[in-house]
Image (cartoon, rainbow, N blue to C red):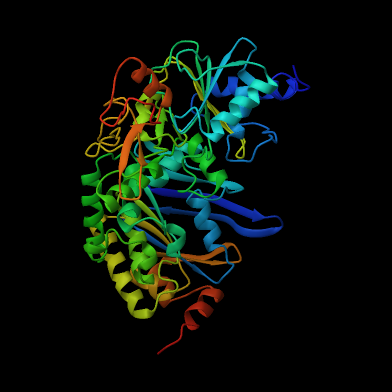
């Protein structure tokens, strides 16, 4: 079976400093990959390189496009942008980075549709309302600006805006960061449901081990720009082999 | 005649502007950067249009300036006198007789013909400006034809007002490629841009951009399938000449709420009155 995403030897340096070095893995359709590690371990660099927001210094990111596997690093920018608004989605840690704060919730959800050529107002609006409903936002708020939304609602709106074009691969950068625990739990519940219903593949970067335990099938542990351990989530978390992973797992506060 | 070089600007500057104009004509709708000069007038009064006019004027030209359709407003009168003094060109208020027409916020009602040049004064050339604040990003969006955001603006209009409420500076797509700001002309004038026989040049002085439409260029106003573009105007005939098909200004005539609608294009209105047309409020004397 062709992997949906195949990362090969991805390296990104910041001058003499290592962003991430020689990262390779395969992601199969319907699979959720978690990437954990401490701050500065290169998680976000890796994610940005994979999503095409940053050019890697070496390596390949081969994505199984609708016309067959292509290396997205060497792809032309218009093609990469097209991928970015059709088959890919990117959920930012801060909803403000991923939303247009001056545009209504409906406009935010509709933007990707209009970017790929939707030109029927009624249909765009119906789709937007439908998606607000799916992420548990009251349809009556379709014309409100995201700045009037709570943090959790903004994050859900960002997810709706990203998933509206039916992407196959979602990149998430700390999707639950900055939310309180009860809101986090609802968001995770929602994400888990969406991932299962839509058969999404996802790469989730986080430092919250509970998030990966709930969402991820496989787990990759990063330290100083390198992958130190990877495997099935339960396996890595319950029987950590590498010293750093052991430290990470034992550092989780017990309530 | 005067101590100025012909048409105020020096020859090297005019050459630089003409180069930008040629490039703009070759890539319709694309904003060409140019080294805008300080002009003896404030930004916002048409410094871009004046520089473009100066670059295209020849001694044989006949020059007309309109401001909101009128030939007799401060802006129009002073720019016309500026070129009378610095270029010594003939001037006119008749649309049909002019070879170069500089305009602010209107396109003349009378159809333009082969060989005429229409120069627009543009305050903000970037149609995506208030949607995406980063200039680097808007340029990339133009380059990659990434115009989804433009429709988001129209979507917002409909969701807020029930219809597309943008009434001026209504975004257009040129030859199926570049989205262009038509300068703040009323959307009533948008259809006149398409397939026009005249050359249309746009100059933005403060923003240092020039763009252009060669003759017979296809210009399409953006819209939705279920909310099509509509060239709207006040639903009245002209009070002076009775014209039903021209763009109208609403003029308050007294303190008791009295008002009248008159053609914004003064030359069009005068020509019609001279031909014997009369509107409901025409008292026989020249009311304007």
Residue B141 sits above or below residue B120 on the image: below
| Pick the front one: B136 or A75 | B136
Give the side of residue A44 with respect to residue A138, left or right. right
Q: Quarter of the image containing the C terminus of chain B?
A: top left
| Residue sticking out furthest to the bottom | A255
Measuring from the top left, give residue B118's x and y in whole percent. 50, 22
Residue A96 seen in this snapshot: yes
The image quadrant of residue A103 is: bottom left
Question: What residue is at 37 percent from the left and 65 percent from the top?
Answer: A155
Measuring from the top left, give residue B139's x and y in whole percent. 54, 39
| Residue sticking out furthest to the right | B3
Residue A112 sits above or below residue A23 on the image: above
Residue B6 sits above or below residue B153 on the image: above
Q: Quarter of the image containing the N terminus of chain B?
A: top right
Give the side of residue A147 with respect to residue B136, left or right. left
Give the side of residue B2 with respect to residue A249, left or right. right
Give the side of residue A111 with respect to residue A124, left or right. right
| Pick the front one: B22 or A83 | B22
| Pick the front one: A101 or B71 | B71
Question: What residue is at 25 percent from the left and 64 percent from the top?
Answer: A193
Measuring from the top left, give residue B11's x and y in whole percent. 74, 20
Residue A1 seen in this snapshot: no
| Pick the front one: A178 or B13 | B13
């Amino acid at each position: 079976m062709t992997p949906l995403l195949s990362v090969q030897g991805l390296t990104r340096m910041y001058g003499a400093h290592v962003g991430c070095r020689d990262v390779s893995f395969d992601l199969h359709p319907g699979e959720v990959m978690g990437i954990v590690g401490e701050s500065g371990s290169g998680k976000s660099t890796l994610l940005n390189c994979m999503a095409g927001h940053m050019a890697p210094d070496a390596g390949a990111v081969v994505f199984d496009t609708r016309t067959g596997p292509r290396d997205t690093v060497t792809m032309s920018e218009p093609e990469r942008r097209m991928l970015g608004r059709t088959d890919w989605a990117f959920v930012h840690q801060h909803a403000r980075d991923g939303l247009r704060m001056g545009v209504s919730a409906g406009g935010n959800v509709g933007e990707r549709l209009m970017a790929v050529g939707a030109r029927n107002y009624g249909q765009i609006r119906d789709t937007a309302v439908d998606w607000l409903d799916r992420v548990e936002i009251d349809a009556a708020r379709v014309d409100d600006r995201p700045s009037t939304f709570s943090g959790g609602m903004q994050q859900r709106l960002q997810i709706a805006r990203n998933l509206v074009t039916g992407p196959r691969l979602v990149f998430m950068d700390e999707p639950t960061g900055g939310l309180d625990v009860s809101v986090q739990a609802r968001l995770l519940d929602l994400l888990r449901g969406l991932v299962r219903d839509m058969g999404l593949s996802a790469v989730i970067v986080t430092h919250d081990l509970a998030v990966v335990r709930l969402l991820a099938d496989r787990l990759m542990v990063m330290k100083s720009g390198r992958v130190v351990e990877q495997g099935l989530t339960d396996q890595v978390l319950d029987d950590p082999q590498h010293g750093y992973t052991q430290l990470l797992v034992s550092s989780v506060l017990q309530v | 005649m005067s101590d100025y070089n012909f048409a105020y600007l020096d020859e090297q500057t005019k050459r630089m502007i003409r180069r930008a104009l040629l490039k703009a004509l070759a890539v319709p709708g694309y904003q060409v950067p140019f080294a805008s000069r300080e002009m003896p007038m404030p930004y916002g009064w048409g410094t871009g249009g004046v520089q473009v006019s100066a670059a295209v004027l020849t001694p044989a030209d006949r020059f007309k300036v309109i401001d909101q359709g009128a030939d007799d407003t401060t802006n129009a009168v002073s720019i016309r006198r500026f070129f009378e003094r610095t270029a010594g060109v003939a001037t006119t208020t008749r649309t049909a007789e002019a070879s170069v027409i500089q305009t602010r916020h209107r396109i003349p009602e009378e159809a333009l013909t082969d060989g005429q040049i229409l120069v627009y004064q543009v305050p903000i050339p970037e149609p995506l400006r208030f949607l995406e604040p980063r200039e680097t990003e808007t340029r990339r969006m133009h380059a990659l034809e990434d115009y989804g955001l433009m429709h988001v603006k129209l979507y917002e209009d409909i969701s807020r007002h029930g219809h597309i409420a943008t009434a001026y500076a209504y975004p257009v797509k040129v030859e199926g490629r570049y989205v262009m700001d038509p300068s703040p002309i009323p959307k009533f004038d948008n259809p006149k841009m398409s397939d026009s026989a005249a050359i249309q040049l746009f100059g933005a002085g403060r923003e240092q951009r020039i763009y252009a439409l060669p003759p017979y260029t296809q210009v399409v106003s953006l819209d939705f399938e279920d909310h099509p573009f509509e060239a709207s105007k006040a639903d009245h005939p002209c009070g002076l000449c009775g014209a039903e098909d021209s763009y109208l200004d609403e003029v308050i005539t007294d303190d008791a709420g009295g008002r009248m609608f008159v053609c914004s294009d003064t030359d069009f209105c005068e020509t019609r009155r001279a031909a014997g047309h009369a509107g409901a409020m025409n008292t026989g004397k020249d009311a304007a």
